Image: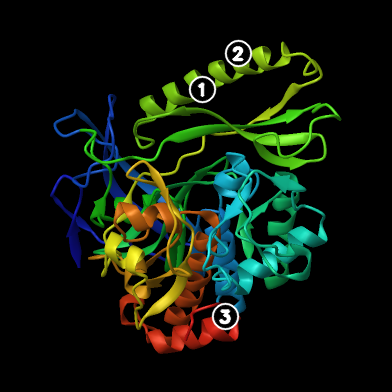
Amino acid sequence: MSRNNRDGQPQKTPAVGRRGFVQAALGGAVAGACGATQAGAPGARAGAPAYRETLSTPVVERHQVVVAGGGPSGVIAAVAAARSGADTLLIERYAFLGGTGVASLMTCYNGFRNQHAPEALQTVKGIPAEYVAELVRLGGVADIDNYERQFTHDVTKGDIPYTVGFDPEAAKVAQLNILKREGVKLQLHSWIAAPMLDGTRVTGVIVESKSGRQAIAADIVIDCTGDGDVAAAAGAPFMSPDESGKTDRMPMTLMYRLGGLPAGVKGAFSGIRIKDRVTRWGPAAKGSALDVNNLTQAEIDTRLKLWDSIQEMRKQPGMESLYLLESATQIGVRETRRILGEYVVTTEDAIEGKRFPDVIAISSNPMPGYHGKRYFFAHAGFDIPYRSLVPKKIDGLVLSGRCISSEQGPFQSARSMAPAMAIGHASGCAAALAVKNGVQPRQLDVKALQALLVRQKAELRT
């Protein structure tokens, strides 16, 4: 069996074994990459010069389910897959878990229920709620935040409000704890470099780390990279904001933590507060987070602006004790790719609260930048169908988190971390069931998936 390489020339299908090798001829841009394209390698510019290399990559491990990315959705997906009976490996590029919530200090899990009425239904339950309970046990829930409250809920008793502010250090430990309980294998310090492919079927991932370039084979891969890196590199079509300004790309934000908050300061101080420390929203940047040059410039500009703004803040009477405790490891990225799936959730679906027979999660978070305004739903939340987790053209892969198939309106809601965790719960169960039944994700019995999610206490309104 053969397939074409990225230059359209025939090449042999990679042979995969527990101790085998993956051989492929790859082409990549030498310089000047300017955004992701669907033709050729992600990040390659049409017509750019190419450097050809022939690689033999050792296949060092094989797992039933490999989760690519250890953010909130990825962690929950890994727990769900393992609990559902699959041998599961979670791969993360940083030295810790938590994704945007921890690395980018976006320390508020929004969207456990509608922020405004009607909000009686807690739409995100199951394994995400277990994770919040572990945060509570560790004392890792914030004292106060600056989100508007219309109703009272007690997170310490399992009644989770719209948002849960959290301590990022506690989150690192809480996520390790829930993974350990389910026997999830973990590999940190590993960058997902490419998917392993057999034609249009993903058969694992290739990672780069201090151990070099390695291949890890899998029956099913879950793309929890946020940017849809695995799906895009495998050739899945995707949607993304164009560069013309016609679409409203959500901005990037550099979050930071202040220490030394004066004792006399009451309230949240425009952030998420834990005692005398507060996490706040810092300078913002526009542009594509898929363009390394733009992303680099965004990091430089926002960090310089942040330092200057802190110095000005300290000049205010009574604020001399303030200091910059920490800036985010990485600027917070909200929007890049949305992979085109078997169904695209539309803005009308979200606003109308459309119900789907293949619902696997519910998103109740508002659309924070819908035509420049924060749009609150007049219902408890909209359904996310399983079909939006199944990429077109590509097998062996389940989507999760903010890269699922949707228009930009519902994306703004579902990309928030609470609904992203609910989606992760579904993607983990789906991957495990696909392995168990020997089918591709698009062939999965959705009723069986829904029954499994309900047994694991997910909220589907069924």
Q: Give the x, y percent position of residue 261.
A: 79, 28
> For the view shown, which residue lies furthest in the right direction?
263
Q: Which label's residue is closer to the chain start, 1 or 2?
A: 1
Q: Vertical placement of 167 versus 284: above or below?
A: below
**Image position of 276 (left or right of 376):** right
Residue drawn at x 70%, y 49% as measured from the top left: 166
Q: Give the x, y percent position of residue 265.
A: 79, 31
Residue drawn at x 35%, y 37% as measured from the top left: 290
What SS does tag 3 mark?
loop
For label 2, count other residues whose C-alpha is less than 10 Å away and answer few (under 14), some (14-19) or many (20+): few
What SS does tag 1 mark?
helix
State how far apart marks 1 and 2 are (Cα).
Answer: 10 Å
Say what amino acid the circle numbered 2 marks. Answer: Asp
Q: Quadrant of residue 345?
A: bottom left
Q: Give the x, y percent position of residue 15.
A: 34, 63
Q: Mark on residue 308?
A: 2
In this rendering, the label closer to the viewer, 1 or 2: 2
Render colour scheme? rainbow
Which residue in the protein does label 1 denote? 302
Nearest the viewer among 46 and 151 is 151
Q: Quadrant of residue 381?
A: bottom left
Q: Which label's residue is closer to the chain start, 3 or 2?
A: 3
Which residue in the protein does label 3 denote? 84
What SS does tag 2 mark?
helix
Say what amino acid the circle numbered 1 marks. Answer: Thr
State how far apart marks 1 and 3 are (Cα).
Answer: 43 Å
Q: Quadrant of residue 456?
A: bottom right
Query: Taking the image as drawn, is residue 206 in sight?
Result: yes
